[in-house]
Amino acid sequence: MKKCLLLLFCWAAAGVVAQNKQLLYGVDDLPQSLLLNPGASYNFDTYFGIPLVSGFSVSGGSKGVSAWDIFQVGGDINGRINNAVRRLDNKDVFTANQQLEILSFGWLGRDKESFYSGGMYQETDVLLYFPKDIAVLAYDGNAPYINRPFQFSDISVTAELLSVYHFGINKKLSRKLRLGARAKLYMSMANVNSTGNEGFFRTRDTPEGPNFYTHEIVGANVEANTSGLAGIIDDDGDISSITKNAILSPNIGLGIDIGGTYNFSDQLSVSASLLDIGFISHTRDVRTYGLSGSYELDGLELEFPALLAGESTTDYWDEFIDEVEEQLPYKDGQEESYTTWRPVKFNGGFNYGFREDIDGGCNCTDKSGRRFTSNVGLHINAIKRPKSVFTAATIYYDRAWNSFLRTKITYTANAFSQKNIGLLFSTKIKNFNFYLAADNLLEYTDVSKARELSLQMGMQVVINPK
Amino acid sequence: MYIRLKYACGFLLACLLASCSSELDFDQADEVVLTPKVDANLVFFTLGTETFLDETIPDTTVVVRDTTRLEFLDDSFVRDNIKEIELTFQVDNTFLQSFTNKSVFLNANGVEQYVLEFSVESSPDGTTARTTVVEMLDENEIEAIRNSTQLANELMLNTNGSFIDGMISLQSKALYSLEIGDL
């Protein structure tokens, strides 16, 4: 247990834009680009994924601290943890995301201007803000921090395991404009959600008060919801209910992706998409834990009843417990329905193609113009998270070397990292496509010190336009 | 061109396949210890002259006593992790007489486990006289506190038969130093 907590702690830190798939965005040879922008340009007639291996991505990271920072051999681990607790703040975040395509397919419509795609994928998405105030309170106690409020809002965590059925349409509206939309049906397998917490705990110095301090909980509104976890909570770790929910879950949601591409000219285009505009309604196998209200405690006041005069004794402890329960009502596993919103993602791209045309100068599928062997551009990614919006900007150089190999190199910067270099290569042998992409290549020199990594790979059958 | 291509692919594969990791020692997790210091109020009271006028048993000494349960002391988490306890009492007295304060920690059966007794200064002229007592407990005394679930506070007013008038208030707190190694 301790190891698990510490490993989690190691990841707890800042500013990672997990799910930013800048290496795949806009690569028109890869069907996965349609999952990032349903209105993207594409260069295939038909595709179908090889079940379970057509697409896999995993990403996660931290900035403030790495596994090596805590678990390096020698020295004092408690000192290193102490340093990390001081260094991290409540905006530092641990994030991990994993997607596995179970089924994927797509085909060009008879009108040659519409492309239909669909499938099913499984996703795990975890986001945990470093609970700075709670960690400091646990590590140091309240004694060094008299009069300092410890904010409950620092507790912010979401974890979702779900499967997603999706179907999208990509439609060319004119020579310049292409739009797309994708409908999604979410099947939540398991969910933990505790966000939007409020209130604080404080020990206040009271020189004019009846005792040394007033211990106070002010405006508490702390709640954690779970769904799909009854088997684990109630039945000692039975996870069978989670796996059953993968195909058909009682906790379902709806969502939509929208996107488009506008070609200013054959060489210049802009694109944008909004993904996962949707929600999941959790109504079955749900549990709610929480605490709300305000309470002040000066200690237990003794009244010294005049027993000889017939006054009765007072049960101060029971009175105290009753007061706490009345003023700080708590929920201990009540079955309450709740709704979670999917993290909305924005992608925006600006692409400029140059050098000689691929395929003799004609993009025969979408007829939107010529295709070039080289592309440079800018990609912006943003993800809405409980406390903030994570943003990242990428510049890239994308090169099709020949009919079977394409590479893309990216440099990505966000508020927390300015040395993220990524590389994609996609190879095609006859109709069989394989791609491999990795971020933060500089971090691979020593994985134990890595604070952010992501990897995407997959293989599928892609039939190109003749 | 193909040389550059070869380098690009080779670089990615080299990064992924030949990446290395410094040696890590996850067994150090067993050495992790949290050492919070928790400062918490205990009991308090303010008593006026009337409290001592009601109690008329001895001629020259008035004794008042009250007891409360402190069940958190019996909590297994507290029992297992307390390493140090520092008790602080502060008494403000405007009586012209001195007091003796006795704070007694009792187990569930009412048997004394630990007693802290101290004198409270008398006021020279009706103004507030403050007495502060800070007591750092030794290992045996901490063990006695671990066995306690109640706190009784006893005040003895030494009247010497003279007129009494004033106010006495007591504040108390405990500073617990914990050592939490079993997360």
Image: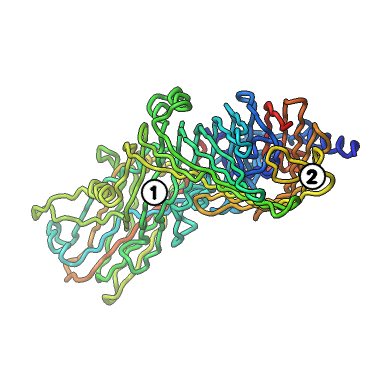
Identify the mark at residue A372; answer none if there is no mark.
2
Q: Are marks 2 and 1 on the same chain?
A: yes
Question: Percent from the top left, x then y, of residue B148?
Answer: 33, 41
Q: Residue furthest front?
A: A111
10 Å neighbourhood of mark 2: few (<14), some, or many (≥20)?
Answer: many
Q: Is residue A374 left or right of residue A47?
A: right
Task: Between residue A211 and residue B162, name the one nearer to us.
Answer: A211
Looking at this rendering, what residue extends furthest in the bottom direction? Answer: B125
Does B163 sit above or below residue A419?
below
Per the image, the residue denoted by label 1 is A222
The mark closer to the camera, 2 or 1, is 2
| Pointer 1 chain | A
Q: Quadrant of the C terminus of chain A?
A: top right
Position in image of residue A356 (x %, y %): 84, 45
- The mark nearer the N terminus, 2 or 1, is 1
Corner quadrant of residue A117:
top right
* Chain letter of disc 2 in the image: A
Which residue is drawn at the image coordinates 37% and 42% (left, top)?
Answer: A338
